[in-house]
Amino acid sequence: MRLQVFENYEEVSKAAAKIVASQIIVKPDCVLGLATGSTPVGMYRELCRMYRDGLLDFSAVTTFNLDEYYPIDRDNAQSYHTFMWENLFSHINVRKDAVHIPDGSALDAQTECDSYERVVTEKGVDLQILGIGQNGHIGFNEPDESLEVKTHVTALTDNTVHANSRFFESEEAVPKKALTMGIGTILAAKKIVLLACGKNKHDAIVGLLNGRVTTALPASFLNLHNDVIVICDKEAYEG
Ligand code: F6R
């Protein structure tokens, strides 16, 4: 696992965008695994700028998002579907049919997860972008006695519901479940970049970097992968 520590959020965002840009330049028809949440917003902004400046072409890129709330309508202002179109997809030339986000409005959540897993596994992710929860979750793989390998339906922990309530009108409005890639789906990516900013991520980053694997900190499973870069700001690294 390689570690890069930067002064602030802006620098983290630029460094992450450079890695994504290099991936697209080296392999224009690459498959990107994408995350939502506040951390990658600056990276998406930077990628949109590179596209506007004519430096990047997304026309052959395929994307798979990590997760989506369940249940939630695509058009809900807080869905990850809306987030991705607002922060990235509407501003670049990615093909609509090349974008994949778990469908939070599917009637049968498990069937949706199974078909998502099938498609993402068939395509194969070249570069997976991750954030990390304060409790060490990646995607919505929450700390537990055991972790799911494949894309699945999961219950959000109180900690995550509370952390994400900042995007909703109230804590009660946060969906209590999600559809998420599993730990195995994430580890199948060829390359993984995890971003972390702010003091509240410090404990999770310490746990991730101590080189042990535990289901109490799902991100620690990234230690089993041979091409992971952790990019964080000083606050997340030093606490
Ligand atoms: C989002 C996701 C989550 C977030 C994590 C951190 O698609 O999978 O694991 O990456 O909750 O969220 P922020 O960046 O808002 O702190």
Image (cartoon, rainbow, N blue to C red):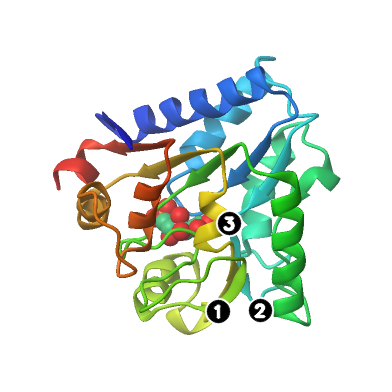
Q: Residues within 10 Å of mark 3 (few under 14, many from 20)?
A: some
- Looking at the image, is mark 2 or mark 3 nearer the viewer? 3
**Mark 2–mark 3 contact, CB under 8 Å?**
no
- Check mark 3 vs ligand 1: CB closer than 8 Å? yes or no: no
Q: Secondary structure at mark 2?
A: loop
Badge 2 amino acid: Pro
**Mark 2–mark 1 contact, CB under 8 Å?**
yes
Badge 3 amino acid: Thr
- Looking at the image, which residue is at 70% across and 57% down? 101
- Looking at the image, which residue is at 42% across and 38% down? 226
Q: Secondary structure at mark 3?
A: helix
86 or 18, nearer to the observer? 18
The residue pinned by badge 2 equals 71
Judged left or right of residue 16, residue 21 is right
The residue pinned by badge 3 equals 185
- Looking at the image, which residue is at 15% across and 48% down? 239
| First along the sequence among labels 2 and 3 | 2
| First along the sequence among labels 2 and 1 | 2
Numbered tag placed on residue 177 in the rendering? 1
